[in-house]
């Protein structure tokens, strides 16, 4: 039996706003990944230390591969057997690569 756990993290609850990315920037964030794609978490952008710790507690750590399930109305990712949902500001603070 597979157990899936879904969490929702709202910027309203954590007072986070999306940081604009410079035009032509090569930095990729979780917010820009198309649904169905798998990416490697490489770090964190504008997120505070507390927000980073929160993400790490759910397994969203540098070096971990995650699969993006949806981008609307929120970003939903699968980390191993757990699904996590983030509003745009949080997803824009998670740096990813291929």
Image (cartoon, rainbow, N blue to C red):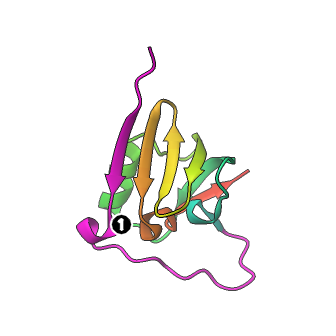
Image spot of residue 46 (x, y percent) = 46, 71
Does residue 70 appear to the left or right of 84 in the view shown? right
Q: Residue furthest left?
A: 13
Relative to 95, say whether 15 is above or below: below
Which residue range is magenta in the image?
1-27
Residue depicted at x 59% and y 49%: 68
Residue depicted at x 60% and y 53%: 42
Q: Residue furthest bottom?
A: 23
Q: Residue furthest front?
A: 73
Relative to 20, say whether 50 is above or below: above
Relative to 48, say whether 25 is above or below: below
Image spot of residue 24 (x, y percent) = 75, 82
Q: Main secondary structure of the magenta part?
A: loop
Residue depicted at x 55% and y 56%: 43
Viewer-proximal residue among 11 and 22: 11
Asked whether 13 falls inside the magenta stretch, the response is yes
Q: Which residue is mark 1?
A: 48
Does residue 38 appear to the left or right of 43 in the view shown? right
Q: Quadrant of residue 14?
A: bottom left
Circle 1 packing at 10 Å, graded few (<14), some (14-19), many (20+), is few
Image spot of residue 72 (x, y percent) = 52, 63
Quadrant for the N terminus in the image: top left
Q: Quadrant of residue 71?
A: bottom right
Q: Tell me the SS state at disc 1.
A: loop
């Amino acid at each position: 039996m597979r157990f899936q756990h879904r969490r929702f993290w709202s910027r309203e609850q954590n007072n986070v706003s999306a940081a604009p990315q410079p035009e032509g920037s090569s930095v990729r964030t979780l917010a820009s990944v198309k649904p169905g794609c798998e990416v490697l978490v490489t770090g964190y952008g504008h997120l505070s230390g507390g927000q980073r710790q929160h993400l790490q507690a759910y397994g969203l750590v540098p070096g971990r591969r995650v699969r993006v399930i949806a981008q609307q109305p929120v970003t939903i990712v699968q980390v191993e057997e757990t699904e996590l949902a983030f509003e745009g500001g949080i997803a824009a603070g998670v740096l990813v690569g291929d």
